[in-house]
Image (cartoon, rainbow, N blue to C red):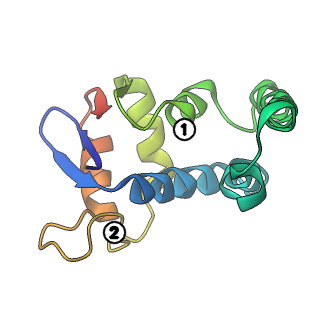
């Protein structure tokens, strides 16, 4: 099980952690400030929050996210990509173009896929998907 991400002409597979690492890389490319904010979701003490503590954390987190969007620290299009579920997500051509503009200078050899496979997903594969000029979907 994992994530298959595809455009009209390209497709690749990766695990949920690889997809998370890719989205963290995108967030880091937005800005250091936004990258740190987004990465805070992966902290162990956040992952184990329950009940009111979890609700309170996400109220604050979402307020900061909304503020960062209003301040144009991150665009709604990029935020939409980053905050969709890991399965059954979709972005349009405009959003995929914006993601590509953030990752186009990244090292194409960065691995996000299953390392034991000959077709291990790399940043170069994701660049192809996001530069395809079509909608991007993942499931």
Of marks 1 and 2, which one's residue comes earlier in the chain?
1
Name the residue nearer the viewer: 136 or 134: 136
Q: Pinpoint residue 79: horizontal percent, then vertical percent.
A: 60, 32
Name the residue nearer the viewer: 35 or 107: 35
Name the residue nearer the viewer: 123 or 23: 23
Tag on residue 92?
none
Q: Pinpoint residue 104: horizontal percent, then vertical percent.
A: 41, 56
Q: Is residue 105 left or right of residue 90?
A: right
Q: Pinpoint residue 117: horizontal percent, then vertical percent.
A: 15, 72
Residue positioned 86% across, 38% down in the render: 53
Q: Pinpoint residue 36: horizontal percent, then vertical percent.
A: 75, 56
Distance in Å between CA atoms under marks 1 and 2: 20 Å
Q: Is residue 63 left or right of residue 15?
A: right
Quadrant for residue 11, please give it: top left
Q: Secondary structure at mark 2?
A: loop
Quadrant for residue 131, please give it: top left
Q: Secondary structure at mark 1?
A: helix
Q: Which residue is mark 1?
A: 82
Residue positioned 24% across, 57% down in the render: 125
Residue positioned 68% across, 36% down in the render: 74
In the image, residue 95 above or below residue 18: above
Q: Which residue is mark 2?
A: 108
In the image, residue 110 above or below residue 47: below
Q: Residues within 10 Å of mark 1 (few under 14, many from 20)?
A: some
């Amino acid at each position: 099980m994992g994530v298959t991400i595809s455009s009209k002409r390209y497709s690749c597979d990766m695990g949920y952690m690889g997809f998370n690492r890719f989205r963290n890389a995108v967030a880091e490319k937005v800005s250091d400030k936004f990258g740190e904010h987004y990465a805070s979701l992966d902290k162990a003490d956040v992952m184990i929050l329950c009940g009111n503590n979890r609700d309170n954390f996400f109220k604050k987190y979402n307020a900061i996210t909304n503020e960062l969007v209003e301040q144009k620290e991150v665009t709604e299009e990029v935020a939409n990509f980053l905050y969709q579920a890991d399965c059954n997500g979709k972005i349009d051509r405009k959003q995929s173009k914006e993601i590509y503009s953030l990752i186009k200078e990244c090292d194409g050899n960065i691995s996000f896929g299953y390392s034991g496979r000959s077709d291990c997903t790399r940043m170069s594969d994701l660049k192809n998907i996001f530069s395809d000029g079509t909608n991007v979907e993942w499931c």
